[in-house]
Image (cartoon, rainbow, N blue to C red):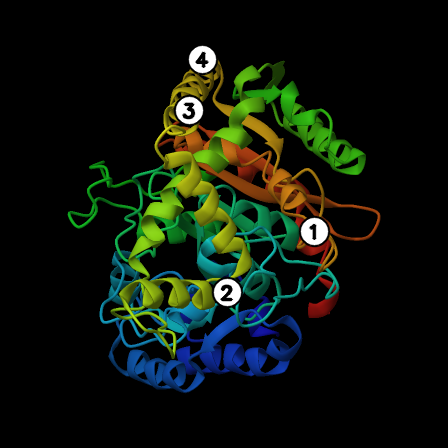
Amino acid sequence: MDITELTVHELQEKIRNKELTVTEITKAYVDRIKEKENDVKAFVTTLEKEALEKAKEVEENADFEKETLAGIPIGIKDNICTKGVKTTCSSKMLENFVSPYDATVMDKINEEKMINLGKLNMDEFAMGGSTEYSYFHKTMNPWNLNKVPGGSSGGSAAAVAANMVPWALGSDTGGSIRQPASFCGVVGLKPTYGLVSRYGLVAFASSLDQIGPITKDVTDCAMLLNVIAGHDEKDSTSVKKDKIDYTKNLKDGVKGLKIAVPKEFFGEGINEEVKEIINKAIEKYRELGATVEEVSLDIAKYALATYYIIACAEASSNLGRFDGVRYTYRTGEFKNLKELYKKSRSEGFGTEVKRRIILGTYVLSSGYYDAYYKKAQQVRTLVMKDFEEVFSKYDVILTPTSPTTAFNIGEKSNNPMEMYLADICTVSVNIAGLPAMSIPCGVDSEGMPVGMQLIGNKFDEETILKTAYAYEQSENFREKYKPQFTK
């Protein structure tokens, strides 16, 4: 038995039945990281020694009947603050920053006595769609080491796909959980804005960012959402909601469910093989008893431009704090305060981050604010209304997660416009603050996974999870297909 092949709910059962110990499980993952990390490069910081020490402590003190997730390893994206551990955002600017506190999601992970295996690589400050914009190294896709794992949560998705962690936390600003989940053949969920606390998440675009799970299957996804969801007084955008068990209705099926398929998401730029595989998934839903109908989300065509104006504007504002004065990278030579700022930021930020700061500063500047930023916020309202109209008649919206499967390393990194267009299927969800998830639904002729995106109404994660579960159980993707690298 390969321990690292098991899902979290399978690991839980093995621990409860005393078939495996926490130390055995943790050691299996530590050994796996040692074996595969040189090729995949999913981590920025590994915590192998600390993980084994924590495993021993949990084994001695946990009540596994009550503390059902005690001893389960996890990987954390490197923009989520972890007390006493480096939180670099994969940037030279924060290369040596050790967080003095835990993010709220980390408090919840620690309460469950889970074991942090390390911090996972990402595009610098979560800006990118391929994990090629990390200051430290590029991450490879376990399905084909010559291809990107997606981004910005590429390290999280690659680590799960390569069985180096059983599950991981990522963050999603415009598709940064769902797109790498699609490229790496795993499950990724972007929760409703406000469902999961952002306290301790290093901000990219505050009105769009959301922490979410990346897992091997839908059951694990629901379980991890149970842990991290909930109101937090430290986050003013966090919403008070009754506690929900997201695993409870997973097996309800999709009979009678109404699924909308927006024609705009199947137009120009969507790869033909991707369309074909998604259309097969649509037929499967019909077989399972769901009603599937084509709709129009006309305003969605403006979503990409709207997203990049809002995201860059908020990034420009949020990254102003990284000035070389307090806890960030500081240039070695400067004559005055202005030069300290200029040189520290010029040397500390990478090309893509600088590009977005410049764009954001431009759209917020006097004379352009009304023409760009204000207009984008007005279009954002129209996008929300468009989605509301569809959800007044349908339960779920189904689209491709990405217009293509994973592309080759270096193929788009020097062409920012092409990289931005890769987000065309995902950004509208963040603009509208909706929940959405990607689940694998097949592979293309190169053997690379294709992701299907399921979008739900606000705070209706239960419906998209049960919709995803019904498809997953009927198709058994994980049994049929495995990354080359894990064989």
Across and down, in percent, residue 66 comes to 26, 63
Q: Residue at x 63, y 71 (%)?
A: 40
Q: Earlier in the sequence, mark 1 or mark 2?
A: 2
Q: Which of marks 3 and 1 is nearer the N terminus?
A: 3
Q: Foreground mark, 2 or 3? A: 3
> Marks 2 and 3, Cα distance to the nearest angstrom?
36 Å
The residue at the far right in this view is 445
Q: Which of marks 4 and 2 is nearer the N terminus?
A: 2
Q: What residue type is labelled 2?
A: Pro
Q: Residue at x 49, y 41 (%)?
A: 174
Q: Foreground mark, 1 or 2? A: 1
Across and down, in percent, residue 121 comes to 51, 66
For the C terminus, give its image quadrant: bottom right
Q: Mark 4 points at which residue?
A: 389
Q: Is mark 1 on a helix, strand or loop?
A: loop
Q: Check if mark 3's residue and mark 1's residue have beta carbons within 8 Å.
A: no
Q: Check if mark 4's residue and mark 2's residue have beta carbons within 8 Å.
A: no
Q: What numbered label is drawn on residue 166?
A: 2
Q: What residue type is labelled 3?
A: Arg
Classify residue 318 as left or right of residue 126: left
Q: Is mark 2 on a helix, strand or loop?
A: loop
Question: For mark 4, does the 10 Å Cα neighbourhood hold few (<14), some (14 to 19), or many (20 or more) residues?
Answer: few
Q: Foreground mark, 1 or 4? A: 1
Question: For mark 2, does the 10 Å Cα neighbourhood hold few (<14), some (14 to 19), or many (20 or more) residues?
Answer: many
